[in-house]
Amino acid sequence: MSDLRTAVVRLDKRTAEVVTPDGDLRWESIGAALNLALIERYGAESLVFGGGPLTGTLAPASALLVGSFVSAWPARADRSAPATSTRHVPLLLTAGPDFRFSGIDHLVLLGAAERPTLLHIDGGRVRFVELPPQAADMPSLENLLRRSAPPFRSAILTSPAADAGVHFASASLGLKGSLDKAGLAGAMAAKNLKGILLGGSGGIAFVAEDLKRSLELVAKLKGERKKTGGFVSVVEAAGGGDCLKVLKGAKLRDAACFHCPAPCMVHAQFAGADPRVPPGPKQQNGLLLLDHMGWIALAKRRGKGALSLLAESIRLGLDPSAVASLLPAEGGKEGLTSDFAVLFDLAKGAGPSPSMSSAAADLTFGVSPLVPGTGEEACRRTALAFVLGVCPLFLLRFPQISGDLAAFLPAGVEPACVKRSAERVITQG
C-alpha cells in the first residue's frame, strides 16, 4: 500500500495533482473508511471515489468502487432514525477495476466547475475533457462520448434529470444504470460534473499465490452457487418471487461483475413495448437487471410493463424505485404510453415529486439496502465489502468466505485495520 495514489482535482480551478496520503490515513483507514477520512481532511463539500485494497485483484467479486459524499438527507425515509451525513454509493460491473487500472486508488473532487465538465482518468493522470453538445438522454450522451472523448472502458455519468435538480436522479454506469439511490448523481451535478471516464489501460500488481487462492475459493463455492440460483434467488430473498413471472417470454442470460464466480444479474431481451416506436416483428429491447430492488418495485407496480419502464428509467437517469412510487396506481387509458409520459415529465422536474427524504430507500450507515435485511450481521458484512472493495451482494450471499479474503490483502494492510475501518464505516457512515 506504499504506492497508494490519490488524485485531488479542483474543478473550479481545473487543476489536478496526484498525491500519496499521509501515513495516518494510509495505515489507519482503507476503502470506504479512507473515503471518510479524505472527506474529513478536504471538507464536507468534497466528493470522493475510492476502491478498496482488493478492488481489481484476483479476489472473487473484486469489482467495487465507492462514491462517498456528505448529504443533508435523513437516515431513513420516515425520519425515524437520526440523520447520518455521509452517503456511500456502490458502483459495480467493471467500474472499480477500471478505476484502479487507470492509475489511482482514490479521487477527491473539490469545488464546482464553471461549466459542465468531464474528467478522463488513465495512466495515473486526470484530464479535463470538453463536453460534447447537450444530450437529451443517457444513450445520446454515451454515443457522443464514444465519438469525441478519449478512449474509455467504464463511465460514471449523470443525466439531464440530475441537471434539472431531480432529487431521485441516479448516476449510471454507461447505459446500464447503477445502485445509486442516495443522490450521487445530484452530488455530481452540484459540481457541474457530467461524468468520469475511466481508461482502464493499466493494471495492478498481485502475487503468484493469488490465482491459486482464487481458484480454491471458487471451488469452495461450487455447491453453494448451485443452491443460490443467481438472479432468481436474490429476487426471492428480496421478497419479489411473485415478480418472476413478469420475465416469462424474455430471453435471459446470466451476467456478473468483474471476477465474480456467482452471477446475480441477468441480461433480459424482450419484445419491444416502446409506445414511441411503431410495432414490428423484429422490435427487440435489451437491458441489464442490475438493480434488483428497483426492478421488483416496478414489476409489482406494472407487471409486464416493468421491463420497458426500467429501460426508460435508465435512459432518463432516474432511480426506478422512486419512479415506481410515483407512477399512478393504474396505467391510465393509454397504458404504457401514459407511463412513459409520466417518466418524461419526472425527468424534467415536472409532475409529482417526492421530497429528498422519501426519494431514497432507508439508509443503513449511509447505504441503501441491496436486499432486505438491515440487522447487525448484514450491516457488518456490507461494511466489510465496502472496506475491502468486493461486491457487498456477494458477501451477503456467501458470508462463509469473509475470512478467506484476508489472504488477498497486500503487504502493510493488517486484519486489525480492516476491522477498524469497517467499524468506522458503520458508526460514521
Image (spheres, helix red, strand yellow):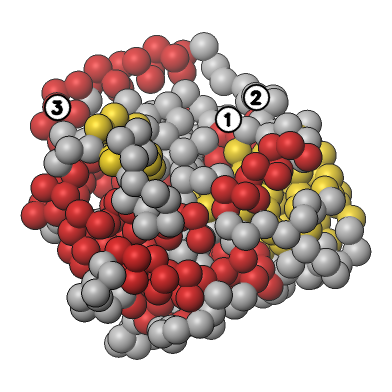
| Residue that appears at 10% across and 52% down | 241
Q: Nearer the viewer, residue 260 or 25?
A: 260
Label 2 sits on a secondary structure element that is loop
Spatial CA span between label 1 and label 3? 34 Å
Judged by depth in the image, the label closer to the viewer, 2 or 1, is 2
Q: Quadrant of residue 266?
A: top left
Contact? badges 2 and 1 (CB < 8 Å): no
Choose the circle earlier in sequence order: 3 or 2: 2
Q: What number is the disc on residue 226?
A: 3
Camera-side mark, 3 or 2: 3
Which residue is label 1 attached to?
A: 411
Give the amino acid type for the residue marked by disc 2 in the picture.
Answer: Gly
Specify whether residue 119 is in view: yes
The image position of residue 160, as x and y in percent, is 62, 66
Could you tell me residue 272's position as x and y percent?
Answer: 33, 45
Q: Quick one: label 1, few (<14), some, or many (20+) residues within 10 Å? A: few
